[in-house]
Image (spheres, rainbow, N blue to C red):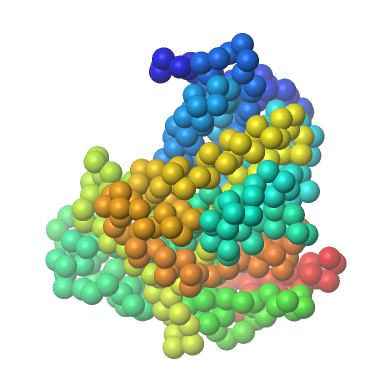
Amino acid sequence: MSEWGTASLYSLKHLGFCRSRLREFLTGLGQSVVLVVAVVSAQPAQAEKITIACAAVGIEYQLCREAAQAWAKEAGHDVQLVQTPASATERLALFQQLLASQSSDIDVFQIDVIWPGLLGRFFIDMSIYFTSQELELHFESMINRFYVNDELKAIPWYADVGLLYYRKDLLEKHGRDVPDTWSELAEAAGAIVEGERKATRHRLVGFVFQGKAYEGLTCNALEWLASYGAEQFLKPDGAVDLENSRAVEALHTAASWIGDVAPRGVLNYAEEEARGVFQSGNAVFMRNWPYAWALVNGSESPVKGNVGITSLPQGSENGIGRGTLGGGGLAVSIYSKNPKLAADLVRYLTSKKEQIRRAIDGAFNPTIPSAYEDRRLLAAQPVMQKFLPMLSAGVGRPARLAGDKYNQLSAIFWNSVHDTLSGQQNARNSLADAQKQISRLMRDR
């Protein structure tokens, strides 16, 4: 332990979350215990305690812990970290349970850019504690995603966009260019896998992505639709346009990969499962978020130095290869007993200095444009220069249009896509069913 703090482990029971419905919920998720790291400041007699719930994908939890500890040392207060499920879908469900219980045990929540409409009523208006000058430092598009009814429900922490990762060494070895289209990707993947398997590399697969039935599949499927010019399926008036030839072709193409270009196991992959296969050297291509860049190039990574990234492929002349936009922010619970101090922790964590550190150590894209001019960042992560145009051209999810119905809409969509990928329905029928269900959902708003 450091000289200024100690750490200990707690379960939800120790934090007062011992409600029967929450126990049942966590058991269903396989999350019987959620760990909390208690960080004790150098001034325990005067210290207040703030608890933050951080995500745990890749290096994410470690970066959150390090920054929270630095703030605690500087501010002279205590911080506890709640380590939440890696799956965004499971994390959202857990947050909904915790916030509905009106507990004050967690002050700061790390939320996805698509959650303000679902959870906004549980969070304070951050503009009370942040000046307009502070807010103007961030990308306007990121700030705008966290507004609900003119109240700012979170401060942007990092920006995300879907990327295509590829093995530079294998493409060069087999004389293949970086693919511009999905058909080129499938052809290159097939040829490389066949060639490598002749050399006894039997575990190599062509392409891995997030094919599990959860929010990550919605992100992937929106990218497929965008590549065929069909991503804006929810209109401002609530009309739904999924049952069209471009969307059908996009989904039919993706389904054709399963068991051929992509292993059948991809139907159960989230971000970390895909990264594990790719980073172990067993995939030619991978769709994932920028966070994976630092990990696949880590000192112990088998593929270090042999990985490239680019924008996702194009599907047809009507479409453009674009990644789905993502990212996260930090929100303060309305049940917090010390919202001002919680907001101060958020200010520290979302600062330019901290965002640059997270970019250098974890490849998390800053939400502050001027951070991309930092020499240390560009020296450590020169690839960051590629991310800016991808972020500006990314595919948005219909979260603001759907409001508090977004989670239901997305679940309908990802389940219909998963049915197609798994062979339970063809693309046209599954999208027709999804259109009917989403149309009913929008009428009931």
Residue 30's image quarter?
Answer: top right
Q: State the image coordinates of residue 430 (x, y, percent, origin top left).
A: 63, 72
Instruction: Give x and y (percent) for residue 431.
Output: 64, 75
**Drawn side of residue 59 relative to residue 167, left or right:** right
**Which residue is the extreme one toward the top?**
45
Q: Quadrant of the N terminus?
A: top left
Q: Is residue 86 visible?
A: no
Q: How many discs appear? A: 0
Q: Residue at x 21, y 53 (%)?
A: 305
Q: Quadrant of residue 43?
A: top right
Front in this rendered view, residue 39 or 87: 39
Give me the residue at 43% from left, 58% from top.
Answer: 370
The image shows residue 369 at horizontal and vertical percentages of: 46, 60
The residue depicted at 28 percent of the width and 44 percent of the height is 298
Above or below residue 121? Residue 312 is: below
* Rendering coords of residue 188 (x, y %): 27, 72
Decide if residue 357 is in sight here: yes
Frontmost residue, 189 versus 324: 324
Quarter of the figure with the C terminus: bottom right
The residue furthest bottom is 317
- Seen at 57% across and 80% down, the residue is 230
Front residue (pair 250, 223): 223
Residue 273's place in the image compared with 236, above or below, is above
Q: Nearer the viewer, residue 177 or 154?
A: 154
